[in-house]
Image: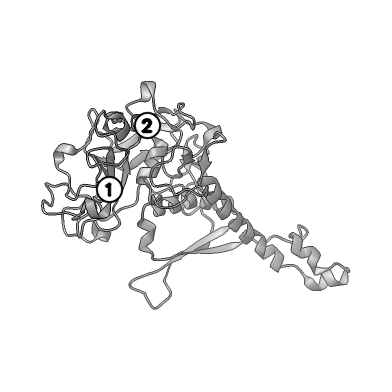
Amino acid sequence: MMSNSTKTISGRLARVVHGLFLSLAFLPAMLSLDVRAAQISGALMSNYAASPISAVAQITPLVMLSMSRDHQYFFKAYNDFSDVDADGVTETTYDDTFEYYGYFHSRLCYEYSDTNQRFQPTGHTDSGDNKHYCVDDQDDKFSGNFLNWATMTRMDIVRKLLYGGMRSTDNASTTVLERAHLPTDAHSFTKYYNLKDLAKLTPFDSQMTDKSNGGNDNGYDDAGEGITICNTSYDGSTAVSQNSTSLPTMRIVFGNRQLWAANERWQCTWESEHGDNANSNNSAQSGLDSVSSDPPNSLRLLTAGSSPERIVRVVVCDSTYFDASQNRENCQSYPSGNRKPTGLLQRYGETGLIKFGLVTGSWSKNISGGALRKAVGDMNDEINSTTDGTF
């Protein structure tokens, strides 16, 4: 369980959506009441409005989901200018007292595998007031809570709530989730961090930060301090995003490059890719010490045996580190003995409590109100629920 000092967004989101589905589930039963019979018995309608009557036959609720065609789904989930925990203080950077919702388990440490091009859990985060730090034998790893803050988009949050997340690997033994595709335009985004617990959250040395580098300890985010993470899906060609096969990437560089994703055209690129690319920041006028040019390759932050291009994919529901009391990945056991990450569609659709359909917007049928993607029905034609839970 989480410590009392830890704040969480996942619980609030889950309760809101859960309440919505419960309301939908009760609606057909309420509509099917025989009002005339109720009046003959002398009962008042107000009695029936309080709760559904269990004596009548239950009609399976039918829910048609409709997704808007909104590019803002692909913005960063945690924008660094909102009060995410509703405590009256704006969060401008990572806040360790907050439990960030996302594909990574907030209580696990991760290392990046070049061979498999993914993050893999290596142990539990048992250190720090909020149990999010990776120290001792895990001190060269990433904190899952930090990675959720650093890499998740709004679309990833929606996907996790609905069906457990987008799977890039889905078989009986392994499940790997993949961050949303982000073109190198205004949808790419940076996350900058410059606090003294950097080494407990990432594999990188805390000497890079302002208050511990023995240098210009002025309390400001100077250009040569901290680390910047840029999330993008770089494609060197001119392919439009829907045709791009580039992988979801995080690029990490030393120094303050908060405006790395604020160039006029190409976002989150290395100097060697577009040498004349710049955001034209004037620190004296903007008040930000962020470097105005793209970073050179020499500033790429690596770890032992690690690539400068880390693909944002993560192994989930790993049996070695699964803890039922801390099931933040919403792992569900299936008859074959394995576990899969699940969401509301599996919870209510696999058992037939609710039947779902999907309609979405369509460029080719833009005056037809959208296109039917799935007729209303149960989820057993989508999920192998009687075997291993694969899609």
- Depth check: 155 or 264 in front? 264
- Element type at mark 1: loop
Label number found at residue 197? 2
Residue found at x 37% / y 31% = 197
Which residue is at 27% across, 42% downward? 228
- Name the residue located 59 percent from the left edge and 58 percent from the top edge: 20
At mark 2, the secondary structure is: loop
Q: Is residue 163 left or right of residue 212?
A: right
Q: Is residue 301 left or right of residue 275?
A: right
**Residue 162's x, y, as percent?**
48, 52
Residue 19, quarter of the rendered image: bottom right
**Residue at the far bottom in the pictured view:** 367
Please tell me which of labels 1 and 2 falls first in the chain.
Answer: 2
Above or below, comparing residue 65 to residue 162 in the picture: below
- Residue 388 in sight here: no
What is the three-letter code of the residue carrying label 1? Gln
Picture coordinates of residue 380, whole percent (x, y): 51, 52
Q: Is residue 361 above or below residue 122?
A: below
Q: Position of residue 126 (x, y in %)?
A: 46, 26
Q: Nearer the viewer, residue 16 or 217?
A: 217
In the picture, measured across the screen, residue 216 lies left or right of residue 322, that is left
Q: Answer whether labels 1 and 2 touch (C-beta < 8 Å).
A: no
x then y, percent, for residue 340: 47, 41
Q: Amino acid at mark 2?
A: Asp
335 sits left or right of 292 in the view: right
Label 2 Cα crowd, 10 Å radius (few <14 / some 14-19 / many 20+): some
Q: Badge 1: how crowded within 10 Å, few (<14), some, or many (20+)? A: many
Q: Which residue is mark 1?
A: 258
The residue nearer to you, when weighing 276 against 246, is 276
Count the labels in the image.
Answer: 2
What is the quadrant of residue 39 in the picture? bottom right
Given residues 365 and 178, the one toward you in this image is: 178
